[in-house]
Amino acid sequence: MYEYAVAWEWLSLAARWFHVITGIAWIGSSFYFIALDLGLVKRPHLPPGVHGEEWQVHGGGFYHVQKYLVAPAEMPEHLTWFKYESYFTWISGFLMLCIVYYGGADLFLIDRTVLDLTPWQAIGISVASLALGWVIYDQLCKSPIGRNTWGLMIVLYIVLVAMAWGYTQVFSGRAAFLHLGAFTATIMSANVFFIIIPNQKVVVADLIAGRTPDPKYGVIAKQRSLHNNYLTLPVIFFMLSNHYPLAFATYFNWVIAALVFLMGVTIRHWFNTTHARKGRPTWTWLATVILFIVIIWLSTVPKVLTGETETSMTPIQQKFASNAHFGAARDVIQARCSMCHAAEPVYEGVIFTPKSVKLETDREIAAHAREIYIQAGLSHAMPPGNVTGISPEERRLITAWYESAISE
């Protein structure tokens, strides 16, 4: 059974790599077309129906791009669609969610000091929240509020902040941030799947049939594309945040999330304004820095506000803690790891608990059994550079503990 942990670790890496590859493809094409659209120039010589053109240079060649506001007079022979980047980014992201958070629900998804859930309850809430997010967003877009793009974005921001607070009341801090990213990314990918591509297909069908396409389909698709543009950077932040406990594992984590969305807006506003040749609003960078400083302060508010409490062990944790090899492994971990992985680290230069992983009590050690096995048993990843001098024999004790417990 212990081979399962190794296979699962490699499966997680493969899914993560797949997600990064598809995410780069989607974000790259999305940012390019937004910049292209904003940089279009209207000139008198343009053919009928052309909204604007742009000359670009890249890779030693020149490109002349023209945009039709609705559609050309007839269907072009070759038409490239940009959709699979979005679809596979979402699919690979959901695959990661299943592997890491659903497969390791007791460790990564559930925090019983927040809410005592069974794995299936937590997974059900997770899936339902992602679907509900799209429904709420889509209905807002189709309501009278949706006629005002910026008004809609303000309402959407309120919804996102509410979800940030809600997720932190249900899941662990790490899972809350990851779900906030997944919640937002689901809206973005669903925009492509349910709105942008279907609208473009309607226009294509009209062209093939010889009808004049209705411009409303392009207007709707552009509004959804604009939303995606402003939501992209916060999603990237939340997907990376699981490596930074000072972001997700603090008392004001949901407030930090709310400010991250604002930083995404200020950063994209600078790029969008610059690409549109409307100046360079440098104030956005000052605003971003101020927001980031506020986030840093919120993450270091006195720990007395967090009110951490010790909880009883889960059945899985009890299995690891009651194993015959646990005592020997615990002695190694407390001698070689707990000087950093403690509520108040004593190792020189370590101020905050790495990854928010504490290994001082039996419950904490049992809760992180698989991570310890992978990081310090099978591999030499921990301690970094073997600074505490853990010996091969001590690594074998950790390996024996995990493999014995998992085989019971």
Image (tube, rainbow, N blue to C red):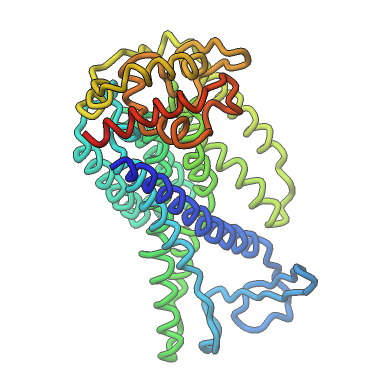
**The C terminus appears in which quarter of the rendering?**
top left
| Residue 209 in which image quadrant | bottom left
317 lies left or right of 192: left
Q: How many numbered discs?
A: 0
Residue closest to the far right: 60
Residue positioned 73% across, 46% down in the render: 280
Where residue 149 appears, x then y in whole percent?
47, 52
Residue closest to the far front: 393
Q: Is residue 324 visible?
A: yes
Vertical relation: 400 (above or below) 86: above
Where residue 402 appears, x then y in whole percent?
33, 31
Viewer-proximal residue, 144 or 122? 122
21 lies left or right of 134: right
| Residue 350 in which image quadrant | top right
Where residue 334 appears, x then y in whole percent?
43, 15
Residue positioned 41% across, 40% down in the render: 178
Residue positioned 35% across, 30% down in the render: 400
Viewer-proximal residue, 323 or 365? 323
**The N terminus appears in which quarter of the rendering?**
top left
14 lies left or right of 144: right
Q: Is residue 254 visible?
A: no
Viewer-proximal residue, 230 or 68? 230
359 lies left or right of 323: right
Viewer-proximal residue, 219 or 188? 188
